[in-house]
Image (cartoon, helix red, strand yellow):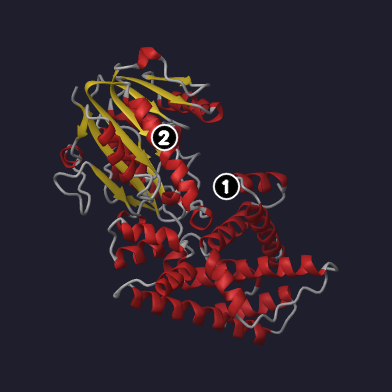
Amino acid sequence: MELKSLFLHSASLIRIILKSSKPADSIAREYFNSNRYIGSNDRKFISESVWTSLRNHNFSIFCLNQADFPIEINDINNNNHAQQLKNELFFIFISCIISNSYQNLTFFFNPEEILRKFYKKNDYNFESASALALSELFQTSTEQITFLIKQIKSFHSELLRKASITADKQLSEENFKIMESLFSVNKWIMKSWSESGMTKNEIFLLAQSLTYPAPIGLRLASSLVKREVAIEFLKESGIDAKAGLFSPASIILSKRQPVNNHELFKKGLLDVQDEGSQLISFACSPEETDIVLDACAGAGGKTLHLASLQNDKGSILATDIEFNRLKEIKFRASRFGFKSINTLLLKNKEIPREFYGKFDLVLVDAPCSGMGTSRRLPLPKIRLTPELVSKLANNQFGILSRYASCVKSGGILVYSTCSLMPEENQQVVIKFLKNNPEFEPDFLEPVFNKYSINLPGLKQDDFFTTLYPSVHGCDGFFIARMKKIL
């Protein structure tokens, strides 16, 4: 596909995503299904450039407002449409420049690779090739484009310098605005982090980490093969992989590569799962014969991991209120050969009375804002509101309270989210314990020690913890473990 077409498709997709309330990944799937002539390499360019643009949404707007903007679109009659397209193309253009500036991003999305296809020269240089390519697309001179590239890099460097200074002094309103523009995280979110006790440097590093793409995580789904053997097997197949930092079952890919057709995957020895998500199941630490309830199970990633930890000798009931998510579990369980998993659709959200006091372990992975996965789905960084977080927190408290009734005396209740917002996390748990004296904190460190998991910063008496992309490298998750004593 021509470079112009790649940029235009990227602009079209980002326009649809920003105008819709649907999840960005669903929109992208629909877009590519509707344009099946787009090849896999071209899809990669389009999707990764769009995702980079979304992760850097506020910075792109900052550049639109600050840069000398020589770009013109002459072949479109409607001026409003032309201006809109110009803005969208500029978003994509900036994403290419940003991606090329971050060396560690090139494993995921390297615009140089695309430009090399079009400009195969011995004296190839990214900036000159960019200028030539974009001058043709935007119908302006290479000198103007070269100047624009330098402006964007200068804006980025200057904001980064100011934000770095910010990390060493008291955060002011101006400091929050700088980081909001640079890292595309709404300032009220960073203020919430600050109020929860995060240091200035921790906020800076966390916000910065959300501008990067997330790694691709796999979970070793069987004790039949050692992790180092699986990694070597993947490497022999041309898939570069390494061990995860914390989960003993985690394998991290160095770049995006399909694994669904790999022999280890087809034999049920590997599954796709973020390392942070794996740590939730380890925090549950089920005994082999435990009766387990996985509430809000979704597509069952944690359900499958729990069955693996029990060696398929327990009994797991996975429930959800959405059929389309729940139906995946049976298919996935059959791939792994698990027979201990059953599913139940709760149509009216009511918990059957026969569930009360029945389960040794209840996992409540509550619906949340998704801030912890915003490297994969970036829109919460820019769309989340305090009102929505408050509404989610009330719903989460209600879900946790209802499913707590299913825990038997002496049983374990684990609450988790993929959020980085304290309102959805520790504040929900503290409120729950205050209203439910039959539950008490159950410390995480001894549980993780069972699996030789050593999390940085986890103290001996911590019963909840937050996993940060900036610290742990995985998606952001919150995990709390409690025990029913009455």
Vertical position of residue 38 compared to residue 291: above or below? below
Q: Residue at x 44, y 45 (%)?
A: 390
Residue at the image point whose x is 52% and y is 31% from the top: 325
Indicate whether 150 appears above or below 231.
Answer: below
Q: Position of residue 468 (x, y in %)?
A: 33, 54
Q: Is residue 400 above or below residue 227?
A: above
Left or right of 377? Residue 396 is left
Q: Secondary structure at mark 1?
A: helix
Disc 2 is placed on an element classified as helix
Q: Residues within 10 Å of mark 2 (few under 14, many from 20)?
A: many
Pick out the residue farthest to the right.
77
- Give residue 97's quadrant in the image: bottom right
Q: Quadrant of residue 5?
A: bottom right
Confirm whether residue 269 shows in the render: no
Q: Nearer the viewer, residue 235 or 308?
A: 308
Residue 9 at x, y = what percent?
A: 69, 59
- The residue where tag 2 is placed is 301
Residue wearing tag 1 = 25
